[in-house]
């Protein structure tokens, strides 16, 4: 549901850009904006953190009580600093150090001896410091706006990682994830040029982690998982 709302909001922005393209000619604001070598700014928005969970292929044979493993995403907050280097008329190189706060859940579906099915959730909080390096392909200006696509690679550090924390009681188990991750980013956005030598943009971007983050300790909650990868959807407004 939350993914649907984010996509609907972004679709409205795209529709507004298309309406501008069809509107009567107007005076272009900041006509020499793209000729500058460097631009700086900041970005702020919301995120939805989640996982790609791959259960063990033979989980049904390994456990009589574990019925399934799934992921429950949650909303979070994102803020970052933008450095944009002009590479050419249609391409930029962007470095956007970002802080993303949020949480997500691993949901274990279990069944008792009486075949009664119930769920048990493990909350996993995250405080990501992200370092994405991306290429931005920008279309020709539609008077005072334009669409664009970004893609790149991101290194991130989870400051809230519990990888080294020890449980105080054997029954007090929490899912541990590794601190460092590397992954790919892909997104789309729309620039809107403003009068005072600046612009605003709205951007929808997806991150897919490449690493297996799960710390295995030969315990019930990790033995039946082959891989846990990070993923995140971000909807941000950027000011440059």
Image (cartoon, rainbow, N blue to C red):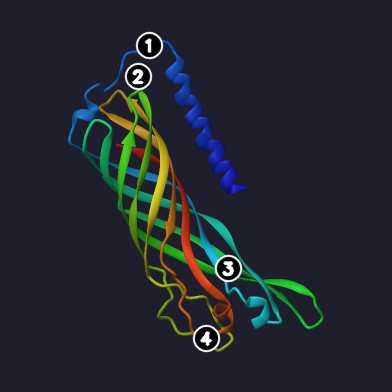
Q: Along the polypeptide, which appears first: circle 4 or circle 3?
A: 3
Label count reads: 4
Callout 4 environment at 10 Å: few (<14), some (14 to 19), or many (20+)? few
What residue does disc 3 label? 106
Disc 3 crowd, CA 10 A, few/some/many (<14, 14-19, 20+): many
Which residue is at the front of the view, 89 or 197?
89
Mark pair 4, 2: CA separation: 60 Å
- Residue 61 shown left or right of residue 144 in the figure: right
Position of 86 relative to 56 (above/below): above
- Mark 1 nearby-residue class (10 Å; few <14, some 14–19, many ≥20): few
Under circle 2, the secondary element is loop
Task: Please give the residue where the numbered disc 4 appears in the rendered image.
Answer: 218
Alpha-carbon distance for marks 3 and 2? 47 Å
According to the picture, the residue beneath numbered tag 2 turns out to be 143
Q: Which mark is residue 177?
A: none
Camera-near label (4 vs 3) is 4
User: Is residue 126 shown above or below 174?
Assistant: above
Structural crowding at the residue carrying mark 2, measured as other residues with C-alpha within 10 Å and reported as few (<14), some (14–19) or many (≥20)? some
Earlier along the polypeptide chain: callout 1 or callout 2?
Answer: 1
Q: Please state if 84 lies on the left or on the right of 130 as rendered.
A: left
Residue 127: horizontal and vertical position, in percent?
41, 63
Query: 14 or 137: which is nearer to us?
Result: 137
Residue occupying the far right of the picture: 114
């Amino acid at each position: 549901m939350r993914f649907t709302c984010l996509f609907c909001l972004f679709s409205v922005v795209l529709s507004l850009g298309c309406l501008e393209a069809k509107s009567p000619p107007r005076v272009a604001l900041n006509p020499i904006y793209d000729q500058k070598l460097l631009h700086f700014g900041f970005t702020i928005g919301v995120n939805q953190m989640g996982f790609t969970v791959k259960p063990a292929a033979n989980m049904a044979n390994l456990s009589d009580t574990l019925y399934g493993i799934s992921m429950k995403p949650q909303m979070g907050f994102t803020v970052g600093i933008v450095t944009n280097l002009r590479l050419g008329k249609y391409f930029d190189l962007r470095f956007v150090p970002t802080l993303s706060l949020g949480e997500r859940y691993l949901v274990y579906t279990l069944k008792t001896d009486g075949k009664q099915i119930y769920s048990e959730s493990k909350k996993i909080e995250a405080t990501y410091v992200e370092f994405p390096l991306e290429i931005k392909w920008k279309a020709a200006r539609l008077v005072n706006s334009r669409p664009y696509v970004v893609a790149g690679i991101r290194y991130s550090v989870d400051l809230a990682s519990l990888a080294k924390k020890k449980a105080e009681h054997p029954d007090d188990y929490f899912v541990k994830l590794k601190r460092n991750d590397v992954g790919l980013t892909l997104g789309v956005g729309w620039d809107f040029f403003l009068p005072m030598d600046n612009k605003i943009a709205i951007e929808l971007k997806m991150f897919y982690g490449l690493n297996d983050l799960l710390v295995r300790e030969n315990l019930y909650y990790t033995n039946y998982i082959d891989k846990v990868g990070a993923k995140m959807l971000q909807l941000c407004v950027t000011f440059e």
